[in-house]
Amino acid sequence: QVRLVESGGGLVQAGDSLRLSCAASGRTFSSYARGWFRQAPGKEREFVAAISWSGGSTYYADSVKGRFTISRDNAKNTVYLQMNSLKPEDTAVYYCAAAPGVGVVVGSREYRYWGQGTQVTVSS
């Protein structure tokens, strides 16, 4: 059974940092693109960041560019999202996902596997 499990969420103050992790099990995702999405209350799920299978290419939403960094460790089947300079508008449930393919994947419909999400709350 394939599982993606996010961790690292929590309640922080504006300006703080958090590091999210997404551990995969059930199969090897080294040949899969990985991504992070988020959904705030009352809003649709939105793209945050994506990384290619090798980690050599990344892509970010404009709203997080320069503050968030996506990375992966294929030996650990894990992808990370380092979030710095957090803002109240970053408050959301953060989901990791995996998509077949080696390049960067931005569209949510291309992702085949999803985690259950981890809550990030940023207070002002």
Image: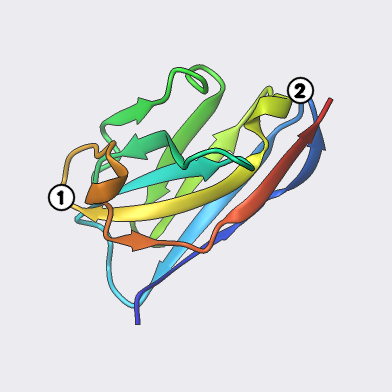
Which quadrant would residue 18 be assigned to in this image? top right
Q: Is residue 46 left or right of residue 83?
A: left
Q: How many marks?
A: 2
When the figure is inspected, residue 117 is found, relative to residue 42, above or below; the finding is: below
Q: Is residue 61 left or right of residue 40?
A: left
Q: Residue furthest bottom?
A: 1
Residue sitting at x 79%, y 25%: 14
Q: Is residue 102 left or right of residue 1?
A: left
Kind of residue at badge 1: Gly
Kind of residue at badge 2: Gly
Quadrant of the image containing the C terminus? top right
Q: Residue furthest front?
A: 42
**Residue 11 versus residue 84: which sits nearer the camera?**
11
Residue sitting at x 31%, y 45%: 108
Q: Residue under label 1, please give it.
A: 101
Which quadrant would residue 4 be assigned to in this image? bottom left
Q: Quote the CA–CA distance across marks 1 and 2.
A: 35 Å
- Residue 59, given in percent of the width and then of the height, sits at 33, 27
Task: Characterize the local packing of mark 2: few (<14), some (14-19) or many (20 or more) Cα atoms within 10 angstroms.
Answer: some
Callout 2: SS = loop
Task: Characterize the local packing of mark 1: few (<14), some (14-19) or many (20 or more) Cα atoms within 10 angstroms.
Answer: some
**Residue 36 versus residue 80: which sits nearer the camera?**
36
- Residue 17, given in percent of the width and then of the height, sits at 70, 33
Residue sitting at x 51%, y 20%: 63
**Residue 76 versus residue 86: which sits nearer the camera?**
86
- Which mark, by number, is residue 15? 2
- Residue 28, given in percent of the width and then of the height, sits at 27, 68
